[in-house]
Image (cartoon, rainbow, N blue to C red):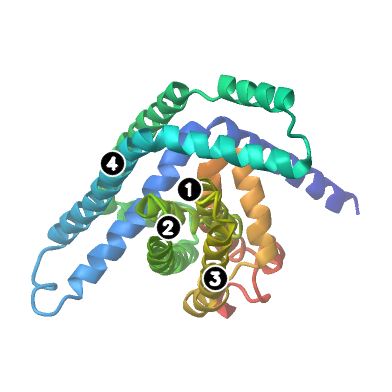
Amino acid sequence: MNERFQSLVYGTVFAIAVGWLLFIARDILVPVVFSVLVIYVILGLARLLARIPVMGRKQPTTLHYALSILLIVLVLFAGASLLLSQMVRVAELAPQYLASLLTTIQRGAVALGVESEPSWTSLRAEFLKHISLTGIAGGTMTLVVSLLGRLVVVSLYVAFLLMEQKVMPAKLAAIAHENGGGEQLQKIITHVNARIGTYLAMKTLISLLTALVSYVIMRLFGLEFAAFWAVLIFLLNFIPYVGSWLSVLVPTAFALLQFGGDPWTVVAIAGVLSVAQFFLGNFLDPYLMANSLNLSGFAILISLAAWAALWGIPGAFLAVPITACITMVLAEFKGTRPIAILMSRNGSVGDDA
């Protein structure tokens, strides 16, 4: 009993220490983890290029990597161009939507029975005092500059990781030789590579499909900035549970500003987007993803809360692949295998999954 209590205490202290280190080192670790995921994407694209009939296998691996990186850069450039063009459009229409927002607030005041001239005048003045288009634009530019800085850091990490890729197997083999357990280490790496690679590929495909369907729906209803919302929905779809709700709520909130005088259009947009999210999330997503990561819904929810608390919004995006890696490692050791079983979808882990 004493030994179990000591193990529990040591384990708790160790977990707290690791959590503290993850929190204080988040500015360093988050770009590193993102760069590792980018490496997975590059390697996956390179493998797809190698499968192209006739030309694919004849080209050197370096060319496959270069084409994969070029494709990612082109996608990022297209996304950045879209965002910049949409920001210019937002600046042009900001006064119109600000007036629409104030009108919506006034209608709400009337519905609640608080529409008297003094109260509405003071409310309007107070609202305008706190809403500064200049401040919003400045905050947006600061965010863009910060994201560009992080993108540069991630790009540097990716470049050095690609250079390390050729010698990494030899390094891992040397570690295994020095400490033993080489077969188990290789097994863990192979398992993680297969599962995470499959997850990223399938999740990207589903996110892209969800964004395209949402884009068509928003365009049919005439919602402004449909392309921008589609890009946002694509990104949000990587956040489990919460992302699906936000993918409906954010465009609907904007539709309320644009179609404030036509509530049925707003309801229709929210309803059709919800149906699309429900179908894709509850039927297509499980069908394609299957047990690619073998994580229970509760484990995903807890990991989302934990990693978001540690690393903020980036932690929410990274929660699922990080937790999956941890679960696969825990499954390979007898002492931690019960934890992996509890975190799994159906109780099967390792070779049984």
Return the residue nearer the eye: 217 or 146: 217
Residue type of the residue flagged with mark 3: Gly
Return the residue nearer the eye: 329 or 296: 296
Which residue is painted at 8% across and 72% down in the image? 58
Q: Left of 75 or right of it: where is 352?
A: right
- Where residue 318 appears, as percent x and y from the top left, is 51, 51
Q: Are marks 1 and 4 in contact (CB under 8 Å)?
A: no
Per the image, the residue denoted by label 1 is 258
Return the residue nearer the eye: 191 or 267: 267
Indicate which disc, 3 or 2, sits on the residue closer to the N terminus: 2
Per the image, the residue denoted by label 2 is 234
- Nearer mark to the viewer, of 1 and 4: 1
Per the image, the residue denoted by label 3 is 281
Crowd band around label 4 with a 10 angstrom C-alpha radius: few (<14), some (14–19), many (20+): few
Tell me, for residue 85, which label it has, or none.
Answer: 4
Image quadrant containing the N terminus: bottom right
- Where residue 62 appears, as percent x and y from the top left, is 15, 57
Q: Are marks 2 and 1 in contact (CB under 8 Å)?
A: no
Return the residue nearer the eye: 64 or 240: 240
Residue 334's place in the image compared with 118, above or below, is below
- Nearer mark to the viewer, of 3 and 4: 4
Residue type of the residue flagged with mark 4: Ser
Residue type of the residue flagged with mark 1: Gln
Q: CA distance from mark 1 to mark 4?
A: 19 Å
Q: Secondary structure at mark 4?
A: helix
Residue type of the residue flagged with mark 2: Phe
Q: CA distance from mark 2 to mark 4?
A: 18 Å
Q: CA distance from mark 3 to mark 2?
A: 13 Å
Indicate which disc, 2 or 4, sits on the residue closer to the N terminus: 4
Crowd band around label 2 with a 10 angstrom C-alpha radius: few (<14), some (14–19), many (20+): many
- Where residue 169 appears, as percent x and y from the top left, is 32, 57
